[in-house]
Structures are given as C-alpha cells and as structure tokens.
Amino acid sequence: MKEIKLFICLFGMISICGLHAQIKTPPASPSCKIVQTVGLTEVTIEYSRPSKKDRDIFASNGLVPFGQKWRTGANKNTTITFDDDVKVGNKDVKKGTYALFTTPMANLWTIYLYDETSNWGLPKSWDATKEVANFQVKPTILPFSVETMMINIGEITSKGATIDLVWDNVMVQIPMEVATDKAVDAAYDKLMAGPSASDYYNLGSYYHETGRDLKKALEFVNLSLAEKQKFWMVRRKSMILADMGNYKDAIATAKESIKLAQAAGNKDYVRMNEKAISEWSAKKGK
C-alpha cells in the first residue's frame, strides 16, 4: 500500500513538473534571415535550412523530385521582401513580401514569386492568379557538395544582384534589378526644385517650438504659406506673431485660420483659434 502511495506521489510530481518544464532541442532545419541593401533597395530573405544527410536531393526520385513544385526550403514559406519596386527574372515586381517556390529540373528550373506567404509548405491549391512572377533559369552543377541549403544575395552592384540558391551540388542564380537610377534622379529633381512648402513649415515649426529664432521661424512659415494656405499653417504663423509680442497681427492671422478651418470642417482648430484670440486680446489691451 505504501509503495502504491509513493508511486502516485512521484507520478503527480513528475506530471506537475512536466507542465512547467520545456525541453529545447535544435531544429532539424534551422531558420535563417538575411538583410541586404542592393543599390538603394533593402532585400530581406527568411527561410529554413534543410540538410542533405546522405540523401539524393535533386533527382527524379530524390528528396526534391524533378518536375514537382518545391517549397524551396523547409517548414513555412521561404519569403523575400523588397522595400521598393524591382525586376526579378526580368519581371516587374512591386515592393512587398512574396513566397518563393521552384520547380527543379535537370537542365532548367522554374521560379515563382507567389502573393501568399502564410502556407506551411506548398499551398493546398495552387492559384496561378497569385503568381507575381514566373520565369526559368538554368542551374549550375558544382564540383563539390553543400550539406546545408543556403540562400544568399551575390554579385551585388548599384543596379542589381543575384539571389543564389545552393544545395548539394546545384546552384541556381535568380537575377534581380533595382531602380537605383530612377531613385537618384527623383532625389536630384527634388533637390533642384528646392524645399517644399512642408519642408519650410517643418523648419518654421522647429524654430518656433524650440524657441531658437522667432524671426527665422516666421520667415520659414511665410515661405510655406506662399506655396499653400492651410489652417494649421496659418495658425502656426499667428502663434509665432503672438510670441513676438505682435498681438494685433496675431489676432488677424488667427481669424484667417478660423475661416480656413471652418471651410475644412475642423472645429478643433476653430476653438483653439478663438481661445487664442481671447487671450491675445486681453494682452493687447494691457
């Protein structure tokens, strides 16, 4: 009887401990994340890395059979994220995150970028309308074998790179182009056009809020107002004028802000301006 009670007690302790204990073991296919800037575009690849383990990989009867779609990695989808529009395999691809799938063959691979990344492995039902890009590349047979699958970004220039998939004795290079020239030209055009109304307004707001230079703050806000008149911009001017002690012009400017705010349906700015006018009118009379 004592032995039974002892067994029950020990079993209970093991059960309770088991609820709280967690044993971690290394995953068979560890996850990997790489982030690489190509030109001015950031490219992020996340995938799980299976190992060869003395198995035939790419073959008719291999772990990855010829002619069948492959998840291109292990576990959940391998994903590629572009933070700008790019060309992959000479196909236009919008910025975003895509799943990478492939169909290996002995002499030609088909590459897919798929606009759904939540699958664990292949989609249950392949939807061709979700193929963002579909193209073919030739594999290279290596004179050596790579044990653990690797995806890397290589041959980097200011205008592009290759997404390199290497496993066993096979390497596949996916060409990628980035729109660096377009981005640089746009930045140049903006620079030559000079600061925008928003740039001037932000500068004026900074000079005002930090108390750095009220005259400069007023100058910058006036430059912004020369391009466009918005109720919050006009209010900023009235506040700067008030802080400079020019209550007369501050009140007149606040009244302009009220008209613009009413036209825009912004009651908050109407109230803020009315309160400011009341306060400045009292100070003006002193």
Image: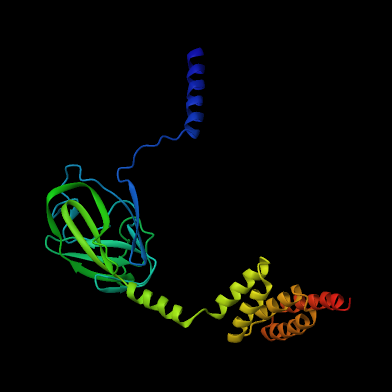
* Side (left or right) of 274 relative to 88: right
Q: Residue at x 11, y 62 (%)?
A: 107
Percent from the top left, x then y, of residue 207? 64, 70
- Which image quarter: residue 138? bottom left
Percent from the top left, x then y, of residue 64? 20, 54
* Figure check: 176 above or below 226: above
* Figure check: 141 above or below 85: above
Q: Residue at x 60, y 86 (%)?
A: 226
Percent from the top left, x then y, of residue 85? 36, 72
Residue most extreme to the right: 286
Foreground of the two, 236 or 247: 247
Foreground of the two, 260 or 209: 209
- Which image quarter: residue 40? bottom left
* Number of numbered discs overlaid on the protein picture: 0
* Side (left or right) of 174 relative to 223: left
* Figure check: 142 above or below 242: above
Foreground of the two, 243 or 162: 243
Residue 50 visible in this rendered orientation of the protein: yes
Q: Residue at x 30, y 43 (%)?
A: 28
The type of colouring in the image is rainbow
Residue most extreme to the top: 2
Percent from the top left, x then y, of residue 100? 30, 62
Q: Quadrant of the C terminus?
A: bottom right
Foreground of the two, 153 or 67: 153
* Figure check: 241 above or below 122: below
* Side (left or right) of 83 relative to 54: right
